[in-house]
Image: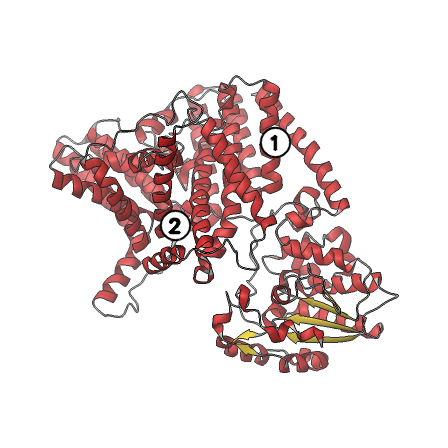
Amino acid sequence: MLFNSIQFALFLPIVFLLYWFVFDRFISKSEHQLRLQNALVVVASYVFYGWWDWRFLLLIVFTSFCSWGSGLLIGKAETRKKAKFWTTINIVLNLGILALFKYYDFFVTEFAQLFLISTDGLLLKVILPVGISFYTFQALSYSIDVYRGKIEPTKDIIAFFAFISFFPQLVAGPIERATNLLPQFLKKREFDYDTAVDGMRQILWGLFKKIVVADNCAVYVDQVFSSYTEQSGSTLFLAAIFFTFQIYGDFSGYSDIAIGTAKLFGIKLMRNFNVPYFSRDIAEFWRRWHISLTTWFRDYVYIPLGGSRVSKAKVIRNTFVIFLVSGFWHGANWTFIAWGAYHAILFLPLILTGNNRKYTNQVAEGRILPTMKEVGQMLLTFVLVVFGWIIFRAESIGQAWEYVCGMIQFGTVRASYRFFTWSEMWPMNLFVVLMLVVEWYTRNMEHTFAIQRFNINKWIRRAIYIVVALITIWYGRFDTNQFIYFQF
Amino acid sequence: MKCFLQTILKYVIIVLLIVVPVDIFKIYSKNYGATVVGSEIYCAIEKSQKKENAKKLLLGDSVGHQLYPCEKEFDNFVSLACNQAITMAGQFFLLKNYIETNVEDLPQEVILLITPFSLSNDVDKHAYHYFLKPFPPYKWSELYTKHLKQRIHSIPFYWSANLPFIQTSSYTPKIAVPSPQVIESVSPLSFEYLLKMDSITKANNIGFHMVSTPIRDDRQNDIALFWESLPAVYISRLSELLQPYKESIMYLPSEWYSDHVHFVGEKTPDDYLNLLSE
């Protein structure tokens, strides 16, 4: 089920009303309320997920059960060695499933090409289960945190299943830590008007970013990338920029809808994006882009490897490992690995010179406009990120190379005949600018649409909500475009 | 909780109170077509309802539109070529509109410029947006055949295409119908509506011809398959149309194409651009 579908528009109010009215109001005992609410979350999440393909629910159940069971075994383990054993078993099981469904065919194909053997009968050709990388990492974080003693193993299987399958963030994150999300399922939630309204604001802004910005950009981007050999340099450059906004609108829009929806159920999810295109260097960009994944790799891969408190050679190794693994996490394709390597190369000078934490505050803090230096830094970082997205978006490294070469042949901005007239393009340009302006002015907020914190007349604020809703209805594309990150 | 539901309800009502009247106004003033995806269809509909004084009328799919866009004025003919997704039923509706509007000054000839692959459309995944919205059921269902009705009813939420705020948006439900790119022959829907186009033109003493758009030379096998799988009943009943149509097919190098049927912008073939000037 997609967030931008009629099905979800019907599903969400039904689950919301059941959650707060039926299972909260009409059941007297508090512990029963909690259990039933969690059970409802599990059932609703399975319906939400099963809408694509119910067969893959078995995988979620398996992952949830293994992680829950391993948590208990780790907790009961008498020695550290035994605890490590059960943690390793759970990691192997979870990563094994992920490898089988996501990477097996890729490795077989690559080895077959390398050793010039046929792949006949060797490939599984299975569909990639939606969101498998997200919920697998969430499950892994639980058993590792139990092993590390950061969280007590839970006996409440329903709460645990709700933690793994919570539908707002099941298929594309944020990848939650057990330390943040699981305790929320173990205690009674109270409905809070302000939180719920704030959730609705965040959903509205998320829909705007997804349906209006990302999906309008997608039309242009898809056509240019599918016929890039025929396009002029400036058209290719423009499409690369629009893809940069498309992927941001798409993924951060999804995260906003997910976080907003979770708020409706009294659950607080972690922030996943923090205005990444206003970053002054690549290190800052990575602190602001897909925060839940970046911090996951930092906590569970980078730091255990020694992080940056080791020799320079090891810092270089660790940096490459984290970026390459992060790239490969996105998909079984060399383009993602190359994208990771590209960012590692950009990141390395900063970490080696100790400048990787130079910008931890918000740009132009306390000022309305940035300085010229900040503008230059942001533009440079943005351009570097754009080139990275070309590698990410291309179907092969060769295509990415051809695309970049094509960009160098600058010509006039001429779009190919059928697809792009100015009347079709102006809303896209306008809405990208609108998104950037709004996000700039609210960059210090908890989320972009938390504008109740501004000292604005309440009628103007209400008018803003209505205008954004109207823009989304009138200029959004509701032709059921998938969210890009679902494929990961 | 009650307060929250009331607040949400208030916003929903306010938005609907703005959206519905504005969209109804847009539909009745016919000024929304240019802003939705597939604006060429709305242009063709509008043009089909205008009085023209042309001897030739051109209908066609998106390749026809690439060669003779309906937005453009031509000296000696009128083009209503727009998009294959309107199906052959949509082409018939355009033709019927045009004939009824120009009953006092009918064209002598109607040409349907279309790629054979477009003829296999039997209501596909694009039909909701490109056919049902510009030709909403509440207006056009009288002209539906039984088969068309069946196909339309297989589209989830097909009825919602009648709603004003759906008509003016790009909302499309996820539709599980086969893509037209799967090579088949003439679809039952195209067959029925080609017969209707043939009979309406004959009844008005108008010549009706089908002409193929140029095909990529690497698709010759697909075309051979297309003719091989043409049912005998279609051949016998449409022979006057299909035989000359088959003969009109020409092949061009695949480098001329940006996808499986459309031309790269600057490579539209001059021969075809001059087709209707003769």
What residue is rendered at 65% in x and 32% in y?
B15
Q: Is residue A368 visible?
A: yes
Is A232 situated above or below A179?
Answer: below
Q: Secondary structure at mark 2?
A: loop
Mark 2 and mark 1 in contact (Cβ < 8 Å)? Answer: no
**Left or right of residue A71: residue A272:** right
Q: Which residue is mark 2?
A: A129
Residue B268, horizontal then vertical, whole percent = 57, 69
User: Picture coordinates of residue B149 (x, y %)?
Assistant: 70, 59
- Amino acid type, callout 2: Pro
Q: Is residue A457 above or below residue A152?
A: above
Neighbourhood count class around disc 1 (C-alpha, 10 Å): few under 14, some 14–19, many 20 upward: few
Residue located at (46% from left, 31% from top): A439
Q: Which mark is residue B128?
A: none
Distance between mark 1 and mark 2 Cα atoms: 37 Å
Q: Nearer the viewer, residue A214 or A198?
A: A214
Q: Which residue is mark 1?
A: A467
Q: 10 Å neighbourhood of mark 2: few (<14), some, or many (≥20)?
A: many
Q: Earlier in the sequence, mark 1 or mark 2?
A: 2
